Amino acid sequence: MLRGAELPVQSEWVIFVVALGVVGVFNVALAVLPRSWIARACKKDRDDEQLFSAPLRLLGGLAAISYVLALVAYLASHRWNLDPQLMLALCPMYFVKMTFDPSPVTVFFLLAPMNAAVYGALGATLGYALLAFRRPH
């Protein structure tokens, strides 16, 4: 019940929130850009299979890992004494567990998928960054 006393100072997380916001805006922009523009930025052919497969693999991988991490954070015993700052960086939904005890249905169908969406978007961003900055063979 007193776990809220261990919450990090809010000003420490401004950069983290801004970074997640930038990732979100970047992914929304990618979703509405024409495929030819994305291909030109990544120095790939418009029909190149790698143009979408690499970012989708990273999106899926990070989304799956972060979904499982959210479940582990929820199911973790208070005796484990997980570091709140580390857990908030890895699983932003850990804040909900620290402030009140959500139901398992809420965690499985709302909080864990939201965590997966956040880090899946980060995976897509990293995938496109790798394609754009990789030197052509």
Image: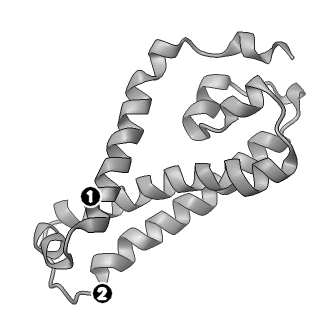
Q: In the current view of this chain or complex, which residue is farthest to the bottom?
A: 47
* Residue 101 x %, y %: 84, 32
Q: In the current view of this chain or complex, which residue is farthest to the front?
A: 32
Q: Which residue is mark 2?
A: 49
* Left or right position of 15 against 30: right
**Residue at 18% over, 60% down:** 133
Q: Is residue 137 visible?
A: no
Under circle 1, the secondary element is helix
Q: Quadrant of the C terminus?
A: bottom left
Q: Which residue is mark 1?
A: 29
Query: 10 Å neighbourhood of mark 1: few (<14), some, or many (≥20)?
Result: few
Going from the N terminus, do you reach mark 2 or mark 1 first? Answer: 1
Q: Quadrant of the N terminus?
A: top right
**Residue at 26% over, 58% down:** 29
Under circle 2, the secondary element is loop
- Front: mark 2 or 1: 1
* Left or right position of 110 against 16: right
* Residue 85 x %, y %: 60, 24
- Using the rendered view, name the quadrant where residue 39 is placed: bottom left
* Residue 128 x %, y %: 28, 63
Q: Is residue 22 above or below residue 59?
A: above
**Residue at 30% over, 87% down:** 49
Q: How is the image coloured?
A: one colour
Mark-to-mark CA distance, 2 and 1 = 21 Å
Query: 10 Å neighbourhood of mark 2: few (<14), some, or many (≥20)?
Result: few
Q: Is residue 12 visible?
A: yes
* Left or right position of 72 against 116: right
* Residue 104 x %, y %: 86, 49
